[in-house]
Image (cartoon, rainbow, N blue to C red):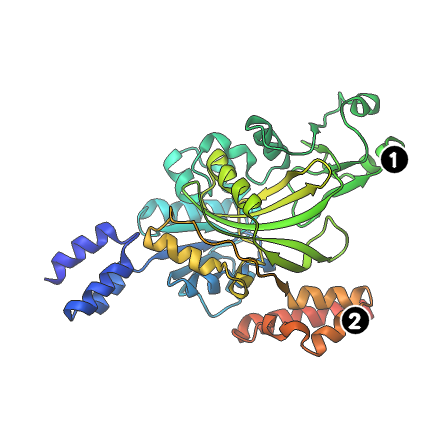
Amino acid sequence: MADTFQKTFTRNKTHRHFLYIQCADLIGLPIKQEINQICMYKVLLASLLGEFDSTSEIPFMFKRAGCDVDIFCASGSWLRSNKFHDKWIETTEIHEDFKTRLLKLVESNPEYYNWIVLLDDAAIRLMNEEINSEYLFKKILPLTKIENREMLSSKIGLSKICEKYSIATPRFINYSDEHDIEKIAQKLDFPILLKENFSFSGIGIQYCADISLLKTCFDKVKNKTNLVLQEFIEGDDIGVEALFKECELITYNCAEILAYMHNKFSFTTRRLYYQSEEIAALLKVLGKQFGLNGFASIQYIYHKERKIYYLLEVDARTNMWMPYSRFTEHDFSNGINKIIRGDIYNINEAVSTKKVEIAIFDRDLRRCVKYKDYKGMLQWLFNYKGYWRFIRFYDLIVLGRTTKKMCYDFYKKIF
């Protein structure tokens, strides 16, 4: 009998684990534990950048959804700094080694993992450049449309894809040596942003107020290959986290930005989360046009006079804010669980009117110290709006490494 169940459940393990366990409960099958082992939804989380701390809480988010979580990273990676992974598969931060080992792992047993998630832009860029097989592309990379692969971890690629699908985005040009300053001024209105093609967290972005400062801005750019020159739009910054499966929007959160680490082009430390029917509609279209198939960290800017949401960024990966969605009414762990159940088309959830202020403990406290924001420090000290619940007490491993890094940063600042 167990053999019969094993064949049936192995064929269907991707989407119906929860139903099998319910059936086992109803008819009192003694093989419930075996069914659970056969049908466990297996996820592989992979990170190339060891010092990218945004990965540390991602295993927790998948564990809460009921997944079996393996991680693929180097020994010192932040992805290891948690207690919520089942198995660590060691690699290195050497690009050739990372991609060779990952491809070998996947190709040796393509159906073993139900979901492979690349957690940083460097890993996505590396595998995007390496993979030619459409099957492996869809298995490893977060798109269903291989023809749109140029948007992955590339600012110029994203701008071109926006142009292809007539998605509102600031006007841009792909800079090359043939563009002199006069030609740039003819094509773009100042102020503009200079963006290095492969960059993240605000690194590699410069604000250029007028044409007289353009040469100075160019001189600061380290890599002018595929440099993006993009008009700067004045408006409200909106941070969005979204989860897609086979182009369908599963869940999302959007946020008003309350605090940046440095300037408005750097990463954020406090956000006010809410829901928006307008943004949900934009995301549904975006998912289908781009072929999004996984997580996305998205940035819009809303121009009030024109009443237009301009798309600025689509990083097809997780970010540090997603595990904190558990404090909102749209928890990403619930979204992952919907994917496990195969429930990807039922997204007609009521739009919540609730707004929730969330802060990342270590990042925001470092910001408070750096800029002498004493009010912000007191808010943490006195548990303002329940801020203490954002401290990572649930996992002493990630809390320990975070605290150690924070103390080291404070020490460097003082001495």
Viewer-proximal residue, 336 or 351?
351
Q: CA distance from mark 2 to mark 1?
A: 36 Å
**Type of amino acid at the residue the image marks with label 2:** Lys
Res. 76 visible in picture: no
Residue 323: x and y, percent?
Answer: 53, 61
Residue 65 place in picture, x, y as percent: 41, 62
Tell me which label, 2 or 1, sits earlier in the chain. 1
Which residue is located at x 51 percent, y 64 percent? 326
What residue would you read off at disc 2? 375
Kindly identify the amino acid type of the residue bearing the numbered disc 1.
Answer: Leu
Q: Bin the neighbour count of mark 1 within 10 Å (Cα to Cα): few under 14, some 14-19, many 20 and up.
A: few
Q: Is residue 327 above or below residue 234?
A: below
Is residue 227 visible in the rendered image? The answer is yes
* Residue that extends furthest to the left in the rendered view of this protein: 1
> Is 235 in front, or is 239?
235
Task: Specify the quadrant that holds the N terminus.
Answer: bottom left
Q: Quadrant of residue 216?
A: top right
Q: Position of residue 208 (x, y in %)?
A: 82, 38
Secondary element type, mark 1? helix
The answer to whether 139 is drawn above or below residue 18 in the figure is above
- Residue 213 image label: 1
Foreground: disc 2 or disc 1: 2
Give the residue displayed 75% in from the left and 69% down from the top.
376
- For numbered disc 2, what is the local secondary structure? helix
